[in-house]
């Protein structure tokens, strides 16, 4: 039962006067009103049945402290019990009891849903915009990998464990495994050929499925269904699908051409100047960067932020991302990707006014045709431009341009959006673009911060939902830390302005000047 009680400070709360005004939690409290969390999560509580539940805002604040200082459930309650600043931030009296650590896990998994965390991030950003702490002129987007909280297994080992599950469930239901069921699981470790080992284990698994299905109860049928689902995925045997029965959502992804990881990808948008995370999404490790770009940008815009520029690396140089950026009237500061734009600019250039391509010798295209090609079940569209054959035949660059081709005229095939990408390519050679692109580097700092100091380098739980909650709570924690710094910066600017205008004369009775800087003695 949810019951919001009126807070009344006790006599013991006089100890809170010892907390300095520049404490990080007091700065956060000045900028963010967390009472909205009670209304946001009210629907997940019963209003008139059961024992009174702990206030959602209190529980959420405990989680924010936990992720801010990278603590366990038990440790955050232990420290909060005697930390005056924490108790003040939680809205408790020094003598009040804190919830049991087990309630934190229950609140995180049952009450605090993924969409609720998205709304909390959005509302905190909206309050910062209203109070003038942020402007949000530029948005950076990037993805960082999160290692799974388990090791990846070979398909042979997974199939062995699946077989054991089926046999164990059958034995539990029948008392013993019937003799007609083959319980001799092959020792795949003694088979040198990796492909042969996988096939042997797969054949055995399919055999015991046929043998146990007629005898199966509910638990055995559940184990058989799980086994069938895994075997039906063509990626499983190729080691591109499930790699653990503990964490079924984790996948193998690539960090570079030579380096891989096993786990998840967290993708987030961040204010390039203020370094605040505006939206977060998590997906399995094999997914491509930029899949959630549209949703993340829409989330950012709902906070009241109107970005004028989008900063990203070349993995985000794709037509759908460029088009989405154009929709909100923002400038894409994204390097051209060779996979999307493959024009040899030392040989060819484009004139957007006449819609013609020119070669380095000055020959121009005289004909254009549009083609559609199907490749691996996908449809690709492109243009084929044909140059003037008379000039191509006598061109001194013919050997370099056409090689050993016997065609009279050079034909240039380009993507359907090549004319737009040409303009991007030329703009990115300017000093203005190179200077603006340096702002993207701030998101790399944030990647390092959330992984090194706030525990996002490795998943704490199992499954996509658990990792998504972890990533979003981490984003809230680092945002609160950054908001405290922005509040301090704003206060310092205001203080400097008042000092220069002579206002400081009314603040403290004792001061002195030294090298044109105002310093204060205790007053």
Image (cartoon, rainbow, N blue to C red):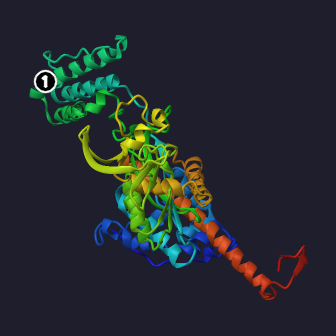
Q: Residues within 10 Å of mark 1 (few under 14, many from 20)?
A: few
- The x, y position of residue 509, in whole percent, is 85, 85
389 or 122: which is nearer to us?
A: 389
Q: Which residue is mark 1?
A: 210
323 or 124: which is nearer to us?
A: 323
Q: Of helix, strand and loop, which one carries label 1? A: helix
Q: On the picture, is 33 further left or further right than 178?
A: right
Q: Residue at x 50, y 31 (%)?
A: 258
Quadrant of the rendered image containing residue 41: bottom left
What quarter of the picture does the N terminus occupy?
A: bottom left
Outermost residue to the left: 214
Q: In the displayed structure, would residue 494 be above or below residue 392?
A: below
Q: On the picture, is 443 further left or further right than 117?
A: right
Q: On the picture, is 300 further left or further right than 487?
A: left
Q: In the displayed structure, would residue 275 be above or below residue 385?
A: below
Q: Residue at x 37, y 70 (%)?
A: 40
Quadrant of the rendered image containing residue 153: top left
Quadrant of the rendered image containing residue 298: bottom left
- The x, y position of residue 228, in whole percent, is 20, 32
- The x, y position of residue 214, in whole percent, is 9, 27
Q: In the displayed structure, would residue 333 be above or below residue 92?
A: above
Q: On the picture, is 508 further left or further right than 255?
A: right
Q: Residue at x 36, y 61 (%)?
A: 115
Q: In the displayed structure, would residue 75 be above or below residue 116?
A: above
């Amino acid at each position: 039962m949810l019951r919001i009680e009126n807070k009344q400070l006790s006599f013991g709360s006089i100890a809170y006067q010892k907390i300095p005004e520049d404490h990080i939690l007091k700065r956060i409290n000045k900028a963010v009103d967390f009472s909205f969390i009670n209304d946001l999560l009210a629907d997940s509580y019963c209003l008139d049945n059961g024992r009174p539940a702990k206030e959602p805002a209190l529980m959420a604040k405990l989680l924010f402290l936990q992720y801010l200082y990278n603590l366990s459930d038990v440790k955050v309650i232990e420290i909060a019990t005697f930390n005056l600043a924490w108790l003040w931030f939680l809205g408790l009296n020094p003598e009040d009891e804190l919830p049991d650590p087990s309630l934190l896990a229950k609140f995180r998994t049952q009450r605090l849903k993924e969409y609720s965390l998205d709304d909390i991030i959005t509302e905190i950003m909206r309050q910062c915009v209203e109070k003038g702490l942020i402007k949000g002129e530029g948005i950076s987007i990037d993805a960082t990998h999160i290692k799974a909280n388990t090791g990846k297994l070979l398909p042979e080992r997974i199939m062995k464990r699946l077989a054991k599950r089926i046999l164990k469930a059958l034995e539990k239901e029948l008392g013993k495994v019937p003799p007609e069921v083959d319980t001799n699981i092959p020792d795949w470790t003694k088979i040198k050929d990796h492909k042969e080992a996988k096939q042997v284990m797969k054949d055995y698994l399919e055999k015991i499925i046929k043998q146990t299905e007629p005898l199966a109860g509910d638990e055995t049928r559940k184990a058989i269904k799980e086994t069938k689902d895994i075997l039906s995925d063509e990626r499983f045997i190729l080691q591109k699908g499930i790699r653990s029965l503990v964490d079924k959502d984790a996948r193998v992804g690539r960090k570079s051409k030579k380096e891989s990881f096993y786990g998840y990808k967290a993708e987030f948008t961040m204010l390039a100047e203020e370094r605040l995370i505006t939206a977060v999404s998590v997906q399995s490790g094999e997914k491509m960067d930029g899949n959630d770009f549209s949703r993340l940008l829409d989330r950012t815009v709902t906070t009241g932020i109107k970005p004028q520029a989008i900063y990203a690396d070349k993995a985000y140089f794709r037509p759908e991302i460029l088009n989405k950026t154009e929709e909100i009237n923002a400038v894409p500061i994204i390097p051209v990707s060779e996979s999307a734009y493959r024009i040899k600019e030392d040989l060819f250039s484009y004139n957007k006014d006449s819609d013609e391509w020119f070669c380095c010798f000055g020959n121009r295209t005289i004909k254009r045709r549009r083609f559609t090609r199907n490749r691996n079940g996908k449809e690709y569209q492109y243009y084929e431009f044909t140059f003037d054959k008379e000039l191509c035949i006598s061109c001194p660059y013919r050997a370099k341009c056409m090689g050993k081709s016997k065609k009279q005229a050079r034909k240039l095939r380009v993507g359907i959006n090549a004319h737009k990408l040409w303009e991007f390519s030329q703009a990115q050679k300017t000093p203005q673009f190179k200077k603006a692109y340096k702002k993207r580097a701030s998101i790399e700092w944030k990647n390092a911060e959330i992984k090194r100091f706030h525990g996002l380098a490795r998943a704490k739980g199992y499954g996509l939902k658990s990792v998504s909650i972890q990533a979003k709570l981490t984003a809230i924690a680092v945002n609160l830390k950054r908001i405290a710094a922005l509040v301090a910066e704003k206060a310092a600017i205001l203080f400097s302005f008042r000092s220069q205008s002579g206002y400081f004369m009314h603040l403290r009775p004792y001061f002195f000047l030294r090298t044109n800087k105002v310093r204060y003695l205790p007053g």
